[in-house]
Image: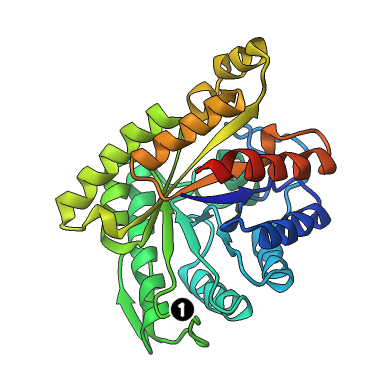
Amino acid sequence: MKFSVWPNPSRSPQEVLDLARMADDDGWYCLWYADHYMPNTGDESFKPGDVHECWSILPAVAAVTSRIRLGPLVAPTSVHHPALLANRAGTIDQMSNGRFVLGLGAGWQINEHAAYGIELEAPGARVSRFEESIQIVRSLLDHERTSFDGDFYTFTDAPCDPKPVQPKLPILVGTGSPRMLRITARHAQQWNTWGAPDLAADRRRDFVDACESVGTDPASMHTSVQALIVMTDDASVAEQALAGPMGDRTIAGSDAHIVEQLGRYAANGFDEFILFDGTLGATHDERLDAYRRFHTDLAAQL
């Protein structure tokens, strides 16, 4: 099983680059970065806070590393035009010498769409836009020229040069809805979800069903999962973490318990676990130390 890092976009660029260098040196698999413009509130309200822009951070990560993979988790097609997505992906793949993964989603964060005047379409239309976008991006990355005449986008003999270094730059989709899962199975190379092992196992069964419904071998798709990790020997701290609103997306407890839970992901067929830093400490140094301890003491056992 592979292990990847995911810094909160509120962290300073210097902390993100320090983490990237550490991950590159210590043998982590990938650095993922969220693609948002403001803190999420769940509605149209605004909450102040730093959110560094994904497509500015990722080229810097590519420049200071030589081994780890990198990509957005995930870029919303409600916000980004497919021409921008494909051309950015091709260029960063060149910068990183073939280490880029293009993470895509349909878009969901209410307040950033409202604040910036970007329409957050009804779910059906949003997924239809996504379906056109992923096909266009795939074609732009793979083919000399792309023409497409859809309900949302029209492309006429469009180029995307330079092409990626990778013969088939992977597209990852983060989703759980049935229709999006079928689109993922048809057009993507990777799938991502949230959840502690029980929730993730349920979602993976839905993913496998979607693959089989469109004739895709689930084993051909790289799959990744993330959950909040709380490393503690204090049972009351673990209980409090699991009782919160993210309880079904949290693993909390001793090192032995966390290793056992991570092993369940592997047993259920997941290829990659992504560690978000939101529960790893209050300071830069605490978070880096927690990443190192997780990698040395826990991930190494798997």
- Residue kind at label 1, given as amino acid type: Gln
Q: Residues within 10 Å of mark 1 (few under 14, many from 20)?
A: some
The correct choice, above or below, for 206 with respect to 143 in the image is: above
Asked if residue 226 lies left or right of residue 122, the reply is right
Residue denoted by label 1 = 166
Can the viewer see residue 251 in this picture?
A: no
The correct choice, above or below, for 269 with respect to 167 in the image is: above
The correct choice, above or below, for 163 with respect to 301 in the image is: below
Q: Tell me what residue is drawn at x 25 percent, y 51 percent.
A: 182
Q: Residue furthest top?
A: 236
Can the viewer see residue 55 in this picture?
A: yes
Please state the horizontal and vertical placement of residue 195, each as a whole percent of the image: 46, 33
**Colour mapping used in the image:** rainbow
Q: Nearer the viewer, residue 23 or 140?
A: 23
Total labels drawn: 1
Question: Residue 112's quadrant in the figure?
Answer: top right
Q: Tell me what residue is drawn at x 58 percent, y 17 percent.
A: 244
Asked if residue 247 lies left or right of residue 201, the reply is right
The correct choice, above or below, for 200 with respect to 54 in the image is: above
Asked if residue 137 lies left or right of residue 29, the reply is left
Q: Tell me what residue is drawn at x 38 percent, y 69 percent.
A: 153
Please state the horizontal and vertical placement of residue 54, each as a whole percent of the image: 65, 58
Q: Nearer the viewer, residue 196 or 145?
A: 196
Please state the horizontal and vertical placement of residue 33, each as a whole percent of the image: 62, 54
Q: Nearer the viewer, residue 237 or 267?
A: 267
Q: Residue furthest front?
A: 301
Please state the horizontal and vertical placement of residue 97, each as a whole percent of the image: 58, 79
Q: Secondary structure at mark 1?
A: loop
Q: Tell me what residue is drawn at x 67 percent, y 22 percent.
A: 232
Asked if residue 219 lies left or right of residue 123, the reply is left
